[in-house]
Amino acid sequence: MKGAYWPLILVLLLGVGFGVVVVFFSAILGPKRPDPIKLSPYECGIDPIGDARTPFFVHYYVIALLFLIFDMEVVFTYPWAVSFRSLGLFGFIEMVVFIVVFLAIFVYVWGRGALEWE
């Protein structure tokens, strides 16, 4: 067990070293021909219109994050349900606390109106 981490450290050093070497040689040997099109903020051929700091509707992202949070609950509940009998009373109490915390989050989010799609 004394030298069990050396292969992992070696792979990590090789990966980071390869990345640094590739970026270094790309900066040194790569072509440097800037022109107004390449220096523009967008290279898609459309001129940028308006301010980049305009507010946008983030409700879609909030719904996606809430989905991920409650999807985590399902991911952690399934293995618990499979090994329910072997965990005993302590495992049951832990899962009840876990579900109560998620239920409190759900009630809070529902009360704030984050689940309303407009």
Image (tube, helix red, strand yellow):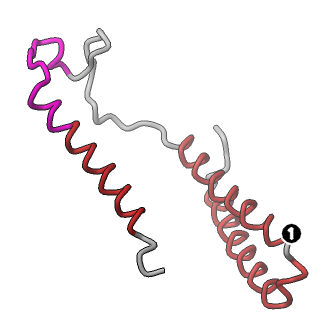
Q: Which residue is mark 1?
A: 82
Give the image location of residue 110, x and y in percent: 68, 59
Which residue lies most toward the top here?
45
Which residue lies most toward the right here?
85
Residue pictured at 15% horizontal, 33% vertical: 25
| 42 with respect to 26 (left or right) | right
Is 25 inside the magenta-drawn segment?
A: yes
Q: Magenta span covers which residues?
A: 23-40
Label 1 neighbour load within 10 Å: few <14, some 14-19, many 20+: few
Give the image location of residue 61, x and y in percent: 53, 44
Residue pictured at 90% horizontal, 81% vertical: 85
Give the image location of residue 68, x and y in percent: 63, 53
Above or below residue 37? Residue 9 is: below
| 92 with respect to 6 (left or right) | right
Determine the main secondary structure of the stretch shown in magenta: helix
User: Which image quarter holds the C terminus?
Assistant: top right
| 81 with respect to 2 (left or right) | right
Closer to the camera in the image, 114 or 6: 6
Above or below residue 3? Residue 51 is: above
Q: State how many labels appear.
A: 1
Give the image location of residue 59, x and y in percent: 54, 43
Q: Amino acid at mark 1?
A: Val
Asked where in the image residue 35 lies, by quadrant, the reply is top left
Residue pictured at 61% horizontal, 52% vertical: 114
| 1 with respect to 87 (left or right) | left
Is 73 inside the magenta-drawn segment?
A: no
Q: Of helix, strand and loop, which one carries label 1?
A: helix
Above or below residue 89? Residue 8 is: above
Residue pictured at 27% horizontal, 23% vertical: 50
